[in-house]
Image (cartoon, grey):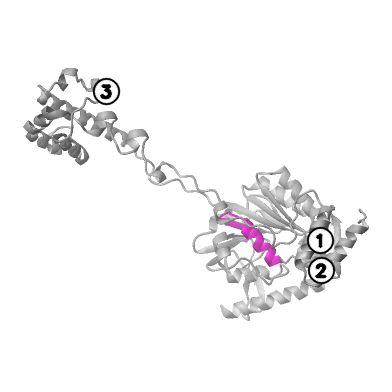
Amino acid sequence: MNEVPPHVTGLAEQRARARAGRDYAGADALRAKIEAEGWLVRDTGDGFELTPRPPFEVWPTVASVPEPGAGDRPPRQAGVADSGTVGSGAAASGTVGSGAAASGTVGSGAAGRDAASMDAGRVAEAADPSARPERLGDLDAERVAETEAAPRQKPEGSELVGRSDEDYHEGHPERTISSQLLWDASLAVSRLDETITPAEPHPPAVPPTVTVGLLVDGWPDDLRDCVRALVARTEARIIGLDLGNVDGAGVVLEELAEEFPRRVEAWHVAETPHWRGGTAEWGESRTKLLKLDSSDVHVVMETSTILDGDAITPLVKVLTDDVAAAGWKGVNPGADGHDWHDAEPGEVRGLLGHLFAVRRDAALAVGGFPEGARYYRNADLEFSLTLPGTLIALDRDLPVHQERHRGYHDVDPGYRDRESRRTYDRVLRLLQDT
């Protein structure tokens, strides 16, 4: 182990005195100096601990980790149906031609106006869809009627409908009107051809985005196995929050983020977990993971839980507007309200924190995870009771298993029982209220 230089120890002692005197700005400045020397300082129950600074960014506390804004999620890509257009160019903009033809003009000068006046009856006849075999629509009828007042101009591409230059002599007004009617009729047919194949009325359903949140508080081998199974068997993103690099677990998390940069996101804080004598609490840390996430579905998972197949998709499929969360293991309270027992698959009152998926909007609506929960045990029940809507457990239908549950078995029994009871008291109050 690296020996701490005396001057770094002196800085840490100064920082401890600053904190005792409530000079938190001074304490933060001393922390920065310690980090600049290549060390991290962690507060413990009986003072402080200095460890070598790892080669990645470390935030001082869980609370200091920056959260993304609401606009950070990329917008859903809109298809043709979303934009309201069914074509491109002039057709998409609502016009049916180009140049003068699109403007609906047929003549110019006094002669053009006289011609329009002389043939007003024929124009009115053309405006009646039932009067012609082309059966012009209302829009075409209006455009034909506009010829009474519009100046005459040769449309581009007139050769496509058999027109010649002599049609534009002022001495042939009848041929001018007839040509314009033929031109408009051909354009109407063209526009109908464009809309025979309409745009898809609704965009295809977009599957919900999913992120697994992992609280990293030690046991690096478990972390490695858990993440590798997630990457191999699911499409979910993974966010890991490392609390104090306990036993080098933070280093392993960083290695996994480098190995799977498109799938794994790593955050590190200097605070150690509360069960190890630190100040990082379970509820606060879990809520931070929830807020770092931007997906539709947030998955709570312990690193001792290992997937044998895709156990995430079945949970996500169960979620609806009425079902707020779905998990692996469910429990129900007994008749006296004091004891909980394992539940059969189906609707349950509580989901265990080994593995469950929750609609992120529902979790945020209740303020995240229990603020007063310093340790995980029973905090999953407290969170379950605060969620609106139905909770579903799938149990044996999921391809998943659990290795040694170190968060329970490898924690000091006195601490475990004390914090479990403290949280369970709040659970009992919630049960009475509901």
Q: Label 3 vs label 2: CA separation?
A: 85 Å
Q: Is residue 197 visible?
A: no
Q: Is residue 146 magenta?
A: no
Left or right, 164 with reference to 9: left
In the image, residue 182 sits, relative to residue 344, either above or below, namely above
Quarter of the C terminus within the rendering: bottom right
Q: Earlier in the sequence, mark 1 or mark 3?
A: 1
Q: Earlier in the sequence, mark 3 or mark 2?
A: 2
Q: Which residue is mark 2?
A: 18
Q: Which residues are magenta?
A: 282-299
Looking at the rendering, which quadrant does residue 333 occupy?
A: bottom right
Q: Residues within 10 Å of mark 1 (few under 14, many from 20)?
A: many
Query: CB under 8 Å between callouts 1 and 2?
Result: yes
Q: Which residue is mark 3?
A: 157
Q: Amino acid at mark 1?
A: Leu
Left or right, 248 with reference to 351: right
What SS does tag 3 mark? loop
Q: Is residue 209 visible?
A: yes
Q: Which residue is mark 1?
A: 30
- Percent x, y for residue 247? 83, 56
Q: Amino acid at mark 3?
A: Gly
> Residue drawn 91% across and 58% down?
7
Q: Residues within 10 Å of mark 3 (few under 14, many from 20)?
A: few
